[in-house]
Image: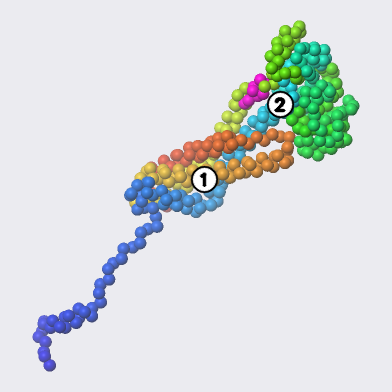
């Protein structure tokens, strides 16, 4: 047997050992982190999908706080839309009611209110048949007492001379018929549905009982009509009127009739205008204090949304101090952190806006069924305005928390407990 010298290994044995030796396996690179860190270095544009996932994950991680924030923004939107719908709806409701009377010209006593003669019946009702009806080009002249009643529900009661008032534009009866006595009253179908009123039923108005003789279609100036003489007695001004409605024989003769009235002896100081002029006047810009009240309500709603988003995002920033420190230590810029916080605030605001608009639509449907006499005007224009107001308030509320998060030192943030 061949002896192997000390320190010497034959070549064949070396090859055999080398052949049987286990090979070295290449080290595998660990999988990338499921985190938008690589995109931070590439820029914000390429990190948008990852950033959106991070924002959504932050919102879903704290569902209770996120739900409260969404609910608060929704309340802000509901408050704006509902108050605007009621306030603007009352004006538009009055406009629609008055336009359905069928008159071309309104004649009011001096210094009377612009709200369809809502003032004391201070002038004789006989002016209508003895003066106005005898003027050239006047087809119908009807005296009316418009009585504002707030004893129960806020409403306007019209005292009318039925023959002349119906001649302006005939009533369309749904049930019953014209009044036949001094204590008979007409109500429109919306009032009847809201108060469950039927023909022959007794209603109590102005401390007086009236029998419902008929139910008419809505849109004739008021929802309740009683004889003008009876309302004058209850008002303490019998045989007087607060406004006169005139229908001309031709709309082209409106200005001629107005000139005749203003030049008639004793009528020079009366307020005479066409119905179209009055309808154009009934806008929020022409009503004293309307825009001020509306702006105050909007300001309160914006403050509510601002405070809610501010509190929510500020708390979120404080809770995620260590996370923000990790992001900044991995290369996230201040703009990236600000963008992250603002995106979360905007997403919460959008969810609240959607919930608020949907809830307001539900409130409108409920109001139409429960309170049909109340005009609840919800327009697309104000839906957009309400959404923008809530969104701007939310962004303003998130600015300081975003700046606070972006200003954190990464070392201090990582050491935060």
Image quadrant holding the N terminus, namely bottom left
Q: Which residues are magenta?
A: 277-284
Which residue was labeled with disc 1? 348
Q: Is residue 113 visible from the viewing direction of this image?
A: no
Q: Quadrant of residue 24?
A: bottom left
Q: Which mark is residue 30?
A: none
383 to the left or right of 315:
right
Front residue of 187 and 4? 187
Q: Secondary structure at mark 2?
A: helix
The residue indicated by pointer 2 is 99
Q: Tell me the crowding category of disc 1: few under 14, some 14 to 19, or many 20 or more residues within 10 angstroms, Cα based.
A: many
Q: Secondary structure at mark 1?
A: helix
Where 228 sits versus 153, above or below?
above
Give yes or no for residue 291 being in the magenta stretch: no
> Residue drawn 66% across and 40% down?
364
Residue 415 vertical placement versus 129 (above, below): below
Magenta span main SS: helix
In the image as oriented, which residue stretches furthest toward the left? 5
């Amino acid at each position: 047997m061949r002896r192997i010298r000390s320190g010497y290994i034959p070549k064949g044995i070396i090859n055999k050992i080398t052949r049987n030796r286990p090979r070295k396996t290449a080290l595998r690179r660990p999988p990338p982190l499921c985190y938008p860190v690589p995109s931070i270095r590439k820029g914000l544009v390429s990190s948008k999908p990852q950033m959106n996932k991070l924002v959504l994950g932050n919102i879903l991680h704290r569902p209770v706080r996120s739900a409260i924030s969404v609910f608060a923004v929704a309340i802000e939107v509901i408050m704006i839309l509902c108050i605007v719908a009621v306030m603007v709806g009352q004006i538009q409701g009055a406009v629609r009611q008055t336009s359905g009377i069928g008159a071309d010209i309104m004649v009011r006593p001096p210094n009377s209110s612009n709200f369809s003669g809502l003032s004391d019946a201070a002038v004789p009702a006989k002016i209508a048949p003895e003066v106005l009806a005898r003027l050239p080009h006047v087809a119908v002249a009807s005296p009316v007492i418009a009585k504002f009643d707030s004893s129960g529900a806020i409403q306007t009661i019209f005292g009318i001379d039925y023959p002349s008032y119906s001649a302006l534009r005939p009533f369309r009866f749904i049930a019953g018929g014209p009044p036949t006595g001094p204590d008979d009253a007409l109500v429109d179908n919306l009032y009847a549905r809201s108060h469950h009123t039927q023909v022959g039923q007794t209603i109590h108005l102005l401390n007086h009982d009236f029998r419902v003789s008929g139910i008419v279609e809505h849109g004739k100036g008021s929802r309740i009509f009683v004889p003008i003489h009876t309302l004058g007695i209850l008002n303490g001004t019998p045989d007087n009127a607060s406004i006169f409605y005139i229908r001309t024989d031709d709309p082209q003769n409106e200005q001629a009739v107005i000139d005749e009235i203003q030049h008639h002896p004793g009528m020079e100081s009366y307020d005479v205008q066409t119905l179209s002029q009055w309808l154009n006047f009934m806008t929020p810009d022409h009503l004293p204090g309307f825009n001020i009240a509306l702006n105050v309500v909007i300001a309160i709603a914006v403050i509510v949304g601002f405070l809610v988003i501010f509190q929510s995002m500020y708390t979120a920033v404080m809770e995620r101090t260590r996370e923000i420190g990790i992001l900044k230590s991995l290369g996230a810029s201040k703009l990236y952190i600000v963008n992250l916080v603002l995106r979360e605030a905007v997403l919460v605001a959008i969810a609240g806006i959607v919930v608020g608009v949907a809830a307001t639509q539900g409130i409108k449907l409920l109001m139409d069924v429960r309170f049909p006499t109340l005009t609840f005007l919800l327009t697309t224009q104000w839906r957009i305005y309400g959404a923008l107001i809530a969104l701007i308030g939310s962004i303003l509320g998130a600015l300081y928390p975003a700046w606070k998060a972006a200003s954190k030192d990464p070392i201090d943030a990582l050491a935060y407990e």
